[in-house]
Image (cartoon, rainbow, N blue to C red):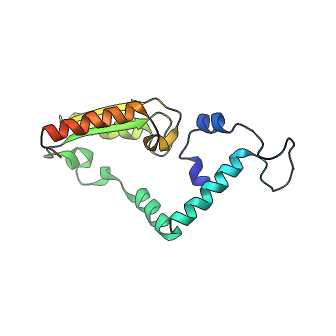
């Protein structure tokens, strides 16, 4: 439930749920589910536990914690040297897990070696999950990039 909060932005949660009560007009002042957001998070928490083994999630999150391209000998620049690839980066303005500032660090390294890269920051309040949702700008940009790669025989 706590992790799921980071997949959405504060404004998306506020818009979707606010402080709306779930099944009553008054606070219970107990540990029952008073708010719609509580009900939503409980549902997501139960659904998540049913889909993922807890240990696999621990391994995935630990791998994310340890992963850092910049610690390679020579730093980020060297990681991307001699790679004949086109890079397309997306970020979402409200993503707390992968903020735009981190993407810009990678872009800076690519720019310093004149790598072919493109970037778009999509202004959305849908948080990290925006790439899973209907974000027209994301989907149209990704489609154009993929079609371009196919035409150039680079996929």
- Compared with residue 72, is residue 106 higher up or lower down, i.e. above or below? above
Looking at the picture, tell me which residue is in the foreground, 79 or 30.
30
- In percent of width and height, residue 114 lies at 17, 34
Q: At 78% across and 42% down in the image, what residue appears? A: 21
Q: At 32% across and 38% down in the image, what residue appears? A: 89
Which image quadrant is residue 47 in? bottom right
- In percent of width and height, residue 44 lies at 60, 55
Q: At 72% across and 45% down in the image, what residue appears? A: 36
Looking at the picture, tell me which residue is in the foreground, 58 or 79.
58
Left or right: 2 as drawn, with respect to 127 = right
Q: At 21% across and 46% down in the image, what residue appears? A: 80
Q: How many marks?
A: 0
- In percent of width and height, residue 28 lies at 87, 49
Looking at the picture, tell me which residue is in the foreground, 27 or 67.
27
Residue 107 visible in the snapshot: no
Q: Quadrant of the N terminus?
A: bottom right
Left or right: 71 as drawn, with respect to 85 = right
Residue 125 visible in the snapshot: yes
- Compared with residue 42, is residue 134 higher up or lower down, i.e. above or below? above
- Compared with residue 1, is residue 145 higher up or lower down, i.e. above or below? above
Left or right: 30 as drawn, with respect to 124 = right
Which image quadrant is residue 122 in? top left
């Amino acid at each position: 439930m706590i992790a799921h909060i980071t997949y959405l932005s504060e404004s998306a949660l506020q818009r979707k749920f606010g402080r709306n009560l779930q099944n009553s007009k008054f606070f219970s002042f107990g540990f029952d589910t008073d708010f719609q957001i509580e009900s939503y998070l409980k549902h997501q928490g139960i659904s998540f536990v049913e889909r993922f083994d807890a240990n696999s999630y621990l391994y995935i999150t630990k791998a994310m914690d340890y992963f850092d391209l910049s610690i390679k000998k020579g730093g980020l620049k060297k990681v991307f040297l001699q790679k004949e690839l086109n890079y397309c980066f997306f970020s979402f303005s409200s993503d707390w897990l992968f903020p735009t500032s981190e993407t810009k660090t990678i872009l800076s390294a690519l720019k310093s070696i004149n790598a072919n890269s493109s970037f778009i920051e999509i202004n959305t309040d849908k948080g990290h999950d925006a790439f899973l949702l209907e974000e027209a700008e994301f989907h149209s940009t990704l489609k154009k990039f993929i079609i371009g790669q196919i035409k150039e025989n680079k996929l």
